[in-house]
Image: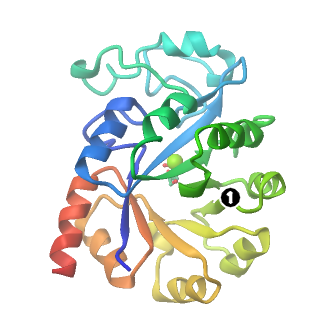
Amino acid sequence: MKTLVYAHRGASKLAPENTMPAFQLAYEMGAEGIETDVQLSKDGIPVLIHDETVRRTTNAIGFVQDYTYEQLQNLDAGSWFSEKFENTPIISLEEFLAWAEGKNIDLNIELKNNVIDYSDLEKKVYQLLIKYKLARRTTISSFNPASIERFKHIDRKIATALLTSQRIKGLVDYAAGLGAHALHIKHRLLNSAIVEQCFEKDMALRVYTINRVSLMKKCYQLKADAIFTDVPDIAIDQRQLFTG
Ligand code: G3P
Ligand code: MG
């Protein structure tokens, strides 16, 4: 099995993260998956943005949860990245799923509820996955273990992943105990022992964020199930060179 290439917030080295141009580019580059981050607007609409505040990636300030969806749509989420992307909007999860519906690509929806525990985020994301019939090729991930458990209660068949950057003793057993299907780890946690443990538990192991060629090679060598990268084009080329 080859290590899959998942575009981290889309092809986020070449287009503003978590926007349609970044997703479209990742798809055109041939990424096997797309990772994105979801939070709730003031009026409870799941929207795609990484930080809890809009400051870094838009022309405004303040918390995502203090803006209505309509207000968020009117922010410029592209100019911070480059003039070329001026007025690129923040999009909703629903727009993203409608775009992904007819495309053969895996999805990883990261629930950004480890700082602000948005009420009903799991239920809202689930309802959209069902509406667009995308549950079977989506993994739901979170740094918040309680959120994984909540998702399990909604529908235990949907793939979930525990995210972590912490070197915790018994991590794989802990994730398995939560009912997670996968572990998404920061690259410094990757070694052959964790690969082996995940294999024994039948858990997928995916690694973030892999932008350096040396790290890509390490992931390919250890046969991680997937990597998250801002540069899917480079990761795909390197995989081709690695596997021959
Ligand atoms: O899902 C992998 C990765 O995105 C987790 O960290 O902060 O980039 O969302 P972050
Ligand atoms: Mg993320």
- Specify few, some or many for label 1: CA neighbours under 10 Å numbering under 14, 14-19, or 20 or more: some
134 is higher (above) or lower (below) than 54: below
On the rendered structure, is 205 left or right of 182? left
Q: Residue at the location (77% across, 55% down)?
A: 155
Colour scheme shown: rainbow
Q: In the structure shown, which secondary structural element does the residue marked by tag 1 occupy?
A: loop
Q: Residue at the location (79% across, 36% down)?
A: 120
- Quadrant for the C terminus in the image: bottom left
Q: Nearer the viewer, residue 78 or 106?
A: 106
What percent of the width, then of the height, locates residue 227?
Answer: 40, 64
> Is the distance from the Cβ of mark 1 to the nearest ligand 1 atom less than 8 Å?
no
On the rendered structure, is 95 left or right of 150? left
- Quadrant for the N terminus in the image: bottom left
Q: Residue at the location (41% across, 52% down)?
A: 105
What percent of the width, then of the height, locates residue 19?
Answer: 40, 31
Q: Which amino acid type is shown beneath numbered disc 1? A: Ile
For the image, the number of numbered tags is 1
Q: Nearer the viewer, residue 123 or 111?
A: 123
What percent of the width, then of the height, locates residue 53?
Answer: 58, 27
On the rendered structure, is 240 left or right of 126? left
What percent of the width, then of the height, locates residue 81?
Answer: 30, 28
Pointer 1 residue: 158
Q: Quadrant of residue 46?
A: top right
153 is higher (above) or lower (below) than 122: below
47 is higher (above) or lower (below) than 6: above
187 is higher (above) or lower (below) than 78: below
